[in-house]
Image (tube, grey):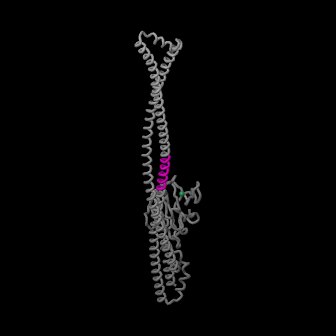
Amino acid sequence: MKSKLFVLNAAAVIGLSSILAAPAAYAESINSLENKKSQIQDQRSGLESKVNTANDKIKQLQDQQDKTRAEMKRIDLAIGETNTKIREKNEQITTTKAEIEKLKAEIVVLKERIAKRNDILKQRALTYQENGGKTNYLEVIFGASSFGDLIDRVSAVSEIMQADEALVNQHEADKKQLEETQQQVENKLASLESMKKDLESMKAKLSTQKVEKDKLMAQLEKEEKDTHTYKMSLEEEDEMLAAQQATISKAIALEKQRQKELEEARKKAAQQAALNNASSGGSGSSSSSNSGGSSSGGNVSNERPAISGGAFTRPAVGTLTSGFGGRWGAFHYGVDIANSADVPILAAADGIVARSYYSSSYGNAVFITHSINGQIYTTVYAHMESRMVSTGATVSKGQQIGIMGNTGESKGQHLHFELHKGSWTPSKSGAINPVGIVPL
Ligand SMILES: [Zn+2]
């Protein structure tokens, strides 16, 4: 009877039920972990090619920007040249206008002179008529005292008449030339005005081109910025995947180690049972170990850490201020637990810290990878005041990992807690509502 109890206790110590169920289940869970690991490797290769594509795109966008900048420089220079030409044309127009004014003034003077001369001639003609026209000249001529005097008088009269006519002709010719010059200068002005108009329309075209290039440049710059941001998010995703890959490798090693220890314990128990059988001669004890497991279950907690309330425990004490789901037009991928004073944050389950870092959005954040019944879960603890574990650390359920805070994109002290089935991804595609799974 005493030896039978001993066998039961030994079996209880190493966890009888787990030994019996263990080898197959662990092999299965290791398999699934290996699968998960190769899945992540595939994801990372995919990411690497996406990063390469993003780099190519950035290079292409930068080339386009260089070309656009060169075009903008060309346009700027052309605008400068056009402005210089317009300025020159303006000066020429001013000069030409002055020239026209001067010519107009000269024409006015000439016209006055011609009018005056015509008046004089008219007056003289009138005098001749009043005095019987040529009679007057005849008087002059017949008043000659001698033939020589007559000749002189005749030629004098003729000269006077010719001189008057020549003068008027000269004035008319001068006036005609001035008018022609004015016409030429006015033509020149018109051509200058038309050239200036062409230059101004060219300038307007160049300015439009400049505005278009400015727009294109802004668009290229924005695209480049977006691609950089996208690349950064890819790199962050890759960092996260790399961290989780390392975590899963560690989890596999842990599982293997545990399996080995369980196997050894099972062998020891079997040897002990055989030894006890041999010394007591009883043959029923080995079969009784199967049925005896449940009767001595109370002793298990002395050897292994007590697991109370299932696989998960409450990560922080506080009020659930925001649940999982749609919120303010966006999706809230976790739950918020708010509290004041120094509130410890606990690991929700056994696991390995995939990442412990400061994120601009999450603030002080810890990501823990859990392997629960062959299923990988990831828990996220964000906005903490401080972190007490580092990347790669093994944590046990209920172990303090930090203090509740208000870091990153947070308004008021609270814990933002996320539960993901599988690995965390930037799209948070694996996020599930922790309510009902994790006691909150
Ligand atoms: Zn939140």
Q: Is residue 74 above or below residue 138?
A: below
Q: Position of residue 148 (x, y in %)?
A: 40, 13
Q: Looking at the image, which residue is at 59% across and 55% down?
A: 329
**At 45% from the left edge and 12% from the top edge, which residue is drawn?**
141
Q: Is residue 211 magenta?
A: yes
Q: Can residue 205 be seen in this view?
A: yes
Where residue 418 appears, as percent x and y from the top left, is 53, 62
Q: Nearer the viewer, residue 308 or 195?
A: 195
Q: Main secondary structure of the magenta part?
A: helix
| Front-most of residues 197 and 311 | 197
| Highlighted range, magenta | 208-225
Query: Is there any visible trace of residue 384 in the rendered image?
Result: no
Q: Which residue is drawn at 43% across and 35% down?
A: 92
Tell whether position 105 is magenta: no
Extreme-left residue of the structure:
148
Q: In which quarter of the image is the C terminus?
A: bottom right
Q: Position of residue 71 (x, y in %)?
A: 44, 51
